[in-house]
Amino acid sequence: MRSVLSVSLPEKIAVELDVFARKTGRNKSDIVKESLGEYLWESRFRHIKKRLIPKAKAAGFVTDNDVFKAIS
């Protein structure tokens, strides 16, 4: 099932979107769908990361390098 959403954009963003769509040969709807999907994924990732940081620190994982060492 699909849902239609009407969005009002500030003029500057609307112009940037138009220019980007023309330059890439993509339609604005696809660009917005992809952007929203990435935003939602990153939001979920940040939420999970925020919950796991205390547990990771307690286990001795403080830096990215600590993680890489553990999985290498």
Image (cartoon, rainbow, N blue to C red):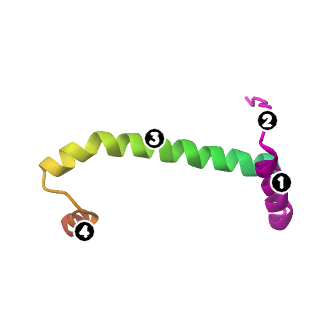
Q: Badge 1, how many Cα within 10 Å: few under 14, some, many 20+?
A: few
User: Which residue has dot 3 on it?
Assistant: 44
Between label 3 and label 1, give the one nearer the viewer: 1
Question: Of label 3 and label 4, which has the lower sequence position?
Answer: 3
Residue 68 shown left or right of residue 21 in the figure: left
Rendered image: mark on residue 65? 4
Between label 4 and label 2, give the one nearer the viewer: 2
User: Which residue has dot 1 on it?
Assistant: 15
Q: Badge 4, how many Cα within 10 Å: few under 14, some, many 20+?
A: few
User: Which residue has dot 2 on it?
Assistant: 8
Is residue 6 located in the magenta-colored stretch of the structure?
yes
Amino acid type shown at disc 4 = Asn
Amino acid type shown at disc 2 = Ser
Q: Position of residue 19 (x, y in %)?
A: 84, 61
Amino acid type shown at disc 1 = Val
Image quadrant for the N terminus?
A: top right
Question: Of label 2 and label 3, which has the lower sequence position?
Answer: 2
Label 4 – label 2 distance at C-alpha: 43 Å
Q: Quadrant of residue 24?
A: bottom right
Q: Position of residue 46 (x, y in %)?
A: 41, 45
In this rendering, the answer to whether 8 lies above or below 71 is: above
Q: Secondary structure at mark 3?
A: helix
Between label 2 and label 3, give the one nearer the viewer: 2
Residue 18 shown left or right of residue 59 in the figure: right
Q: Position of residue 16 (x, y in %)?
A: 79, 56
Q: Residue at x 52, y 45 (%)?
A: 41
Label 2 – label 1 distance at C-alpha: 12 Å
Q: Front-most of 49 and 13?
A: 13
Label 2 – label 3 distance at C-alpha: 25 Å
Q: Residue at x 20, y 49 (%)?
A: 56
In this rendering, the answer to whether 71 lies above or below 14 is: below
